[in-house]
Amino acid sequence: MAEHSISLRQLLTLTFAALLSPAIRVLPGAAARIAGEGGWLATVAALPVLLGLCWVLFALLRKGDGLGETMLTVLGPAAGRAAVGLCLAWGVFLLAANARLVALRFLTVSYRNAPLPLFLAVLLALTLWLAAKPVRVLARAGEVFFLALAIGLGFSLVMGAFQVEPGNLLPLWGENLPSSAAAALPVLGLLGYGTFAAFLGGRVEETPGGRRRTMGWAAGLCLTLTALQAVCLGNFGPGLTVRMNTPFFMMVKGIGIQGTFQRVESVILALWVLSDLALLGLLTRACAEMTCTILPLKSRKTAVLPLVLLALAGGLWLFPDAFALRRLMDRLAIWGNLAVGFGLPVLLLLIKKLWRQE
């Protein structure tokens, strides 16, 4: 049915909008911590790996199948369901952790005395509403979110570029390149969120030129994140950037034109809620697809409410405090996303190729 299918362009647009939410938390601080002034090149170094992942996913997925169904085909019913179950557990953990991080960000930058459970419940209630609708509704919402975020991000980066100090970014020498390549690790951990979109592959209408379009999307995403890092690092330098929780929002606070407007951070903060909802909606819908792959449920909608309630419980009680949550996400989330987002698709493709040769 039409309401249960989306185009590849819509899925890529939704994923782009979703990745901006963790990007402002992870970048550019993590890259600057490893590579200093060369941290802004980390996303460029990660681009070949991301292009390789796109190629692997296109080689792996068959027409009409998402990543969950592909696991059952490649690994068999028992091992396939176990692998999907592990991905589902990781997805629910990320859903709970990111919902908690977003709620904490609200408290940090806007509503310092407000109760955390209220923000968490409202965020997940909106996520429930989005994910329970037909997938086309989520995809169309992602297109609107992307347009608003593109305008806000583009304006912020252009205005922030006028405050860049070239000495914070250049010069770079040959000895800076190994550290810039090493700084691609947290970038790849961030990009690993994108593999959850592959679980919606069974909902995507097949169109010619899909592989080429996805490769272009990957290049555009990496260039956007490179610009984000370069402007933030150019404004603050690596030393100060590392000590900030969200360098992008701090950079936005300094944007203004004398005599016209001086403060636009409230508008940008409001816009970034759209990226948060895109990420939470994508994770929830992907987890619902995984649930229906391993359990005999008649509708994806049936799985959404239990998943959101699990995420709410995890967001409230799984993490003792904000510092423990950030440490956990800075360490465990990177390696978990690398394993699920990059390692698992490559492993599945190798098994598929070996199985065909037997």
Image (cartoon, helix red, strand yellow):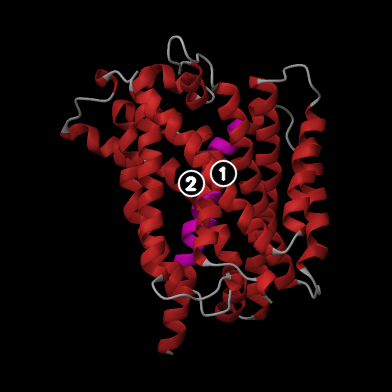
Percent coordinates x, y for residue 50 in the rendering:
39, 55
- Please identify the quarter of the rendering in which residue 45 is found: top left
Please state which of residues 146 and 124 is positioned toward the viewer in this rendering.
146
Task: Verify CB contact (< 8 Å) between mark 2 and mark 1.
Answer: yes
Give the quadrant of the N terminus.
bottom right
- Would residue 280 be seen by someone viewing this image from the given angle? yes
Residue located beneath label 1 in the image: 333
The image shows residue 210, relative to residue 320, as above or below, that is: below
Residue at image location 40% in from the left, 30% down from the top: 157
Highlighted range, magenta? 326-346
Q: Is residue 249 magenta?
A: no
Q: Secondary structure at mark 1?
A: helix
In the image, taking residue 305 as reference, residue 282 lies left or right, namely left
Give the quadrant of the C terminus.
bottom left
Residue at image location 34% in from the left, 32% down from the top: 39
In the image, taking residue 277 as reference, residue 25 lies left or right, namely left
The image shows residue 183, relative to residue 236, as above or below, that is: below
- Please identify the quarter of the rendering in which residue 317 is found: top right
Percent coordinates x, y for residue 302 in the rendering:
83, 64
The numbered mark, 2 or 1, whose residue comes first in the sequence reads 2
Residue located beneath label 2 in the image: 189
Please state which of residues 7 and 292 is positioned toward the viewer in this rendering.
7
Give, as a three-letter code, the residue at label 2: Gly
